[in-house]
Image: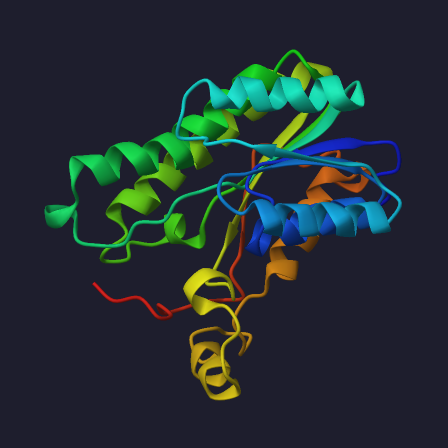
Amino acid sequence: MSLDGKVALVTGGSRGIGAEIVRRLAADGADVGFTYNTGKDEAEKVAGQVRALGRRALTIKADLAEAEAAAEVVEAVAEEFGKLDIIVNNAGAVSWGPLARTSVESFDHLVAVDARAPFLVMQAAADLLSDGGRVVNVSSGVTNTALPGSALYSGAKAFLDQVTKVAAIEFAARGITVNAVGPGATTTGPLADPSPERRAQMGAAFALGRVGEPADTADLVAFLASADAAFITGQVIYNTGGQHSPVGRAV
């Protein structure tokens, strides 16, 4: 799955799943520009890891809750590297809680980051992406179920799923594929670095007996970004390890 000579943009690439995606794309041969919002030191560390692999890296500070940020990020990567082949919309906000107690402020911020931002990134990149390019949107396994407390988050991600399917048709004339991946619970954020006991407890929620790792999603993204996935488009692929119950969520 060589990505030699390719240029990728990954939003939210300084930590967690995003950082693993950046490293994996670079390991497969791509030069990578990626955004961060607050984690400058983390972003520079990831950029150093990309350069250690012999690839070029560009870090971009961007608050994707701001509408103008999407086009600025796309243009920055295209200008730095001279082209754009792969987009991974990974940046996201998370909100858990009952619909009845969700504030307007929470709604506006999460929708701006999780729904509007990837939409605007795809819009800004529509004419810049190389023929045969790739768009991979990081959605969530919660769009495949109805989990109490996830109304806002799963609703925003479901919007992204539907936009993925429509964009796949609109971009197809130039051989650009558009897909989404829907991870299950993953060892990032509040679930990062679990103790062996906690890891075993979380694993009980999965048919495969273990909680998801960032590399599980990065591997799938790298495949969808490669030439091997040229005939796959308009799909939402759930990489949840057969997760059948919540992990570490309280409403």
Residue lying at the far top of the rendered structure: 127
Quick one: 148 or 60, which is closer to the camera?
60
Identify whether 129 is placed above or below 215.
above
| Residue 16 at least partly seen | yes
Residue drawn at 38 percent across, 53 percent down: 142
Percent from the top left, x then y, of residue 217? 61, 54
| Residue 130 at least partly seen | no
Identify whether 31 is placed above or below 170.
below
User: The C terminus lies in which quarter of the figure?
Assistant: bottom left
Residue lying at the far bottom of the rendered structure: 197
Identify whether 20 is placed above or below 32.
below
Identify whether 234 is placed above or below 73.
below
> In the picture provided, is 127 more to the left or to the right than 83?
left
Quick one: 33 or 98, which is closer to the camera?
33
Residue drawn at 28 percent across, 57 percent down: 147
Instruction: Write down the quadrant of residue 30 in the picture.
Output: top right
